[in-house]
């Protein structure tokens, strides 16, 4: 049985502090959602995940970007680097790293849901012939993806897996389950091409994408409901899932 082998102490050292669990639903409107999936080398499967999660086979890196025109904190863009995994039987994406272009939103993301978003300049450009994503941290472009040849999709054809972040919570160090509800009005499938990726800046050489799989771009809205469950990162979900109502 495959399980993660990441150093939990090292992951904990960079995990945000979540002082209380988010209890309200947050609505994001006029959102462009870009997602691109890549296979990674087989050696990348276990080292990027805590032992409470199962790697996928093959190893996958999912880049998920939101360009949000309306939120409770104003417009922002967010990019998440998510490692494909399973928590128990459920398919998830473990947020290894993230970047946001708004300091206020980055603070809210960390304090409400444990998203480890660092400040960056983010560009999401949607065009008739494709779209592009670029993330610049400091003076260097650390991620660039070009996606071309859009084909229309039914909005319901695009699916997004649930998200797990690692944070210091009222329960202790836990995997926090996020279940954003994405409602798209239009969607397109594209062919992604990786133009630039600096694995060292994102925190681990094993992150390097190896083979592009698919990409999509959609326009719609997102609701992030209250946090319901967390999981211990050191044991499997069947043993370590906890309701947030049990917080002391």
Image: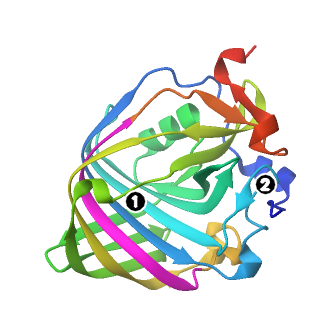
Q: Residue at x 54, y 56 (%)?
A: 98
The colouring scheme, among rainbow, by chain, secondary structure or one colour, is rainbow
Name the chief secondary structure element in magenta: strand
Q: Residue at x 48, y 75 (%)?
A: 143
Q: Secondary structure at mark 1?
A: strand
- Residue 129 locus on image (x, y percent): 17, 80
Say whether residue 194 is magenta.
no
Assess disc 2: are there few (<14), some (14-19) or many (≥20) residues with their C-alpha within 10 Å of its C-alpha: many
Name the residue beneath numbered marker 1. Answer: 65
Report the residue that reaches farthest toward the left.
128
Q: Pointer 2: what residue? A: 50
Task: Tell me, for residue 236, which label it has, or none.
Answer: none
Front position in the image: 143 or 119 = 143
Is 179 displayed left or right of 88 in the figure? left
- Quadrant of residue 200 in the image? bottom right
Does residue 140 appear in the picture of this structure? no
- Left or right for 84, reference 184: right
Of residues 46 and 32, which is closer to you in this image?
Answer: 46
The vertical placement of 184 against 41, above or below, is above
Quadrant of image for the N terminus: bottom right
Kind of element beneath mark 2: loop
Question: In the image as oriented, which residue stretches furthest toward the top?
Answer: 248
Q: Which residues are magenta?
A: 209-223
Question: How far apart, in angstroms, are the residues tagged by discs 2 and 1?
Answer: 24 Å
The reply, left or right, for residue 238 in relation to residue 80 is: right
Could you tell me which residue is drawn at 70 percent across and 77 percent down? 205
Mark 2 or mark 1, which is nearer to you? 2
């Amino acid at each position: 049985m495959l399980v993660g082998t990441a150093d939990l102490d090292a992951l904990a050292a960079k995990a945000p502090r979540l002082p209380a669990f988010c209890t309200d639903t947050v609505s994001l409107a006029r959102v462009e959602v870009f997602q691109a999936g890549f296979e990674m080398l087989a050696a990348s499967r276990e080292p990027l995940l805590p032992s409470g999660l199962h790697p996928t086979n093959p190893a996958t890196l999912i880049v998920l970007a939101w360009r949000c025109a309306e939120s409770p904190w104003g417009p922002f863009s967010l990019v998440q680097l998510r490692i494909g995994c399973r928590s128990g039987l459920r398919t998830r994406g473990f947020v290894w790293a993230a970047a946001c272009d708004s300091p206020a939103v980055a603070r809210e993301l960390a304090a409400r849901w444990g998203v480890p978003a660092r400040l960056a300049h983010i560009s999401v450009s949607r065009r008739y012939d494709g779209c592009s994503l670029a993330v610049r941290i400091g003076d260097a472009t650390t991620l660039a993806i070009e996606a071309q040849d859009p084909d229309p999709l039914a909005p319901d054809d695009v699916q997004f897996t649930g998200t797990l972040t690692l944070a210091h919570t009222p329960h202790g160090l836990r995997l926090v389950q996020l279940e954003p509800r994405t409602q798209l009005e239009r969607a397109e499938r594209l062919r992604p091409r990786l133009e630039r990726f600096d694995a060292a800046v994102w925190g681990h050489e094993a992150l390097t994408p190896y083979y592009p799989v698919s990409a999509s771009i959609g326009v719609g809205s997102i609701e992030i409901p209250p946090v319901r469950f967390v999981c211990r990162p050191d044991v499997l979900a069947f043993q370590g899932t906890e309701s947030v109502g049990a917080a002391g």
